[in-house]
Amino acid sequence: MKIALVSPYDYAYPGGVNNHIASLEEHFTRMGHEVKIIAPSSKPKNAGQNENAIVIGKPVPIRASGSVVRAPISPMLMFSDRIKKMLELEKFDVVHIHEPMMPALAVSVLHHAEGMVIVGTFHATRSNSFGYTIWKPLLRRWMNKLDGKIAVSKAAMEFISRYFPGDYEIIPNGIDLQHFTDKAPPVEKYRDGKLNILFVGRLEKRKGFKYLLGAYERVKREFPQCRLIVVSPHSRLSKKYENIAARRNLKDVVFAGYVSFDDLPGYYNTADIFCSPATGWESFGMVLMEAMATGKPVVASDIPGYAGLISHGVEGLLVKPQDEKALASALMSLLRDKAMRERMGEKGKLKAKDYSWDVVARKVMEYYEKLLQSRTGVVNKEIASASQGSSHPGAAS
């Protein structure tokens, strides 16, 4: 099978959607399929190092949903012959577009794609969408071109269904269980007897870090032998929170800055508790899954994207969003009870196995096959055979 995986976001910047696509490419290739990634890039020369990448469009930073996304917005992509000619030349069996309503590359590929199975995956969730409301009549025309629709979670499905009702297959994000493992060596300088609370993520308003900082102030009074480790790229906001911690005379708050993907499992294994106090707009909670895969109990906000992943009292504790007192109480209950931490950590590792990329990639491939069969009435035997060969030595299943 020949597959196109389309990203609307800058290929030069790793992120949730691009990491998702890269993992699908790796596993589909291992199954024996031919895969191309179509994406914009601010560093096209670097993208050229991947022979499977087709770079189209120059992304620009756009502030949206409390974050910054990098995507091309030029409407000229819609009228460019390049995308149409590329699709005609490549002759894909399946074109899988992630965030298919995102301007301009994703929508442009959807506009030009003809004669192939077209799949869209919806990753996001928000309280509402001004763009979907305004452009719904136009976007519905493109939505109708999708042969199949995937949402990464129930929260993502409920959000997109509000504007475009229909049948959605829920296939979650996956996790690399060979990388995120409790066997990764911890960061030794933080293994000094103090109990470590870990936060991983950008310090944007919607990530709710200010509530964790307030909760930690309460916790520190009860448990002097604890530490808060913050893994987040240095930025204006991180400097702001460093200043707040200094003004409040908060001890043992460590702003570790950017941590590479290779080193990240070590930070999870340094933690005794992982905490994510996001206020909303989280469709899945990849950091929760990473923590669970490394055997760490989780304290997180009780928001739809997180509640679909964490069962309260099983893999962790869910608390009311934006409630410092409730957050502090949950953290202290785990700090007091080592047996509870270990029990929840083991439950998290067990659940993470259901989200391994081997499992997720097979589910996506089976969905492709179902769509191809409904269109042609038959599934190519070579395709079916390739999808059965998705496992590899040492892979988690």
Image (spheres, helix red, strand yellow):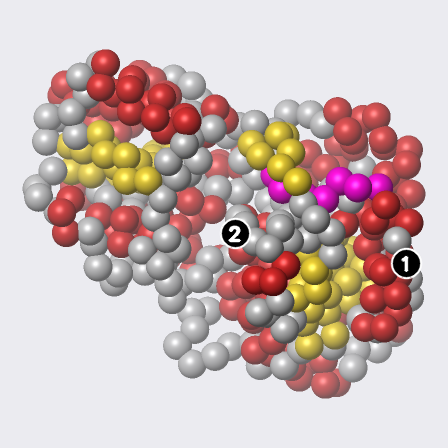
Does 60 appear above or below 290?
above
Does 39 appear above or below 386?
above
Foreground pick, 346 / 49: 49
Foreground pick, 1 / 204: 204
The local crowd at label 1, few if under 14, some if 14 to 19, many if 20 or more residues have their Cα within 10 Å, is few
Q: Which of the labelled discs sits on residue 349, or is there none? A: none
Does 340 appear above or below 38?
above
Answer yes or no: is residue 348 visible. no
Q: What type is the residue that disc 2 sits on?
A: Pro
Report the residue that reaches farthest toward the front.
45
| Residue 210 shown left or right of residue 78 in the figure | left
Chain part drawn in magenta: 69-75
> What residue do we see at 13% from left, 47% from top?
189
Q: Position of residue 114 (x, y in %)?
A: 91, 62
Residue tagged 1: 81
Report the residue that reaches farthest toward the top.
247
Q: Which of the labelled discs sits on residue 14, or is there none? A: 2
| Residue 240 shown left or right of residue 254 in the figure | right
Q: What type is the residue that disc 1 sits on?
A: Asp
Callout in the foreground (1, 2): 1
Q: Is residue 70 magenta?
A: yes
Q: Could you say whether the residue bearing mark 1 is in a helix, strand or loop?
A: helix
Q: Position of residue 173 (x, y in %)?
A: 55, 53
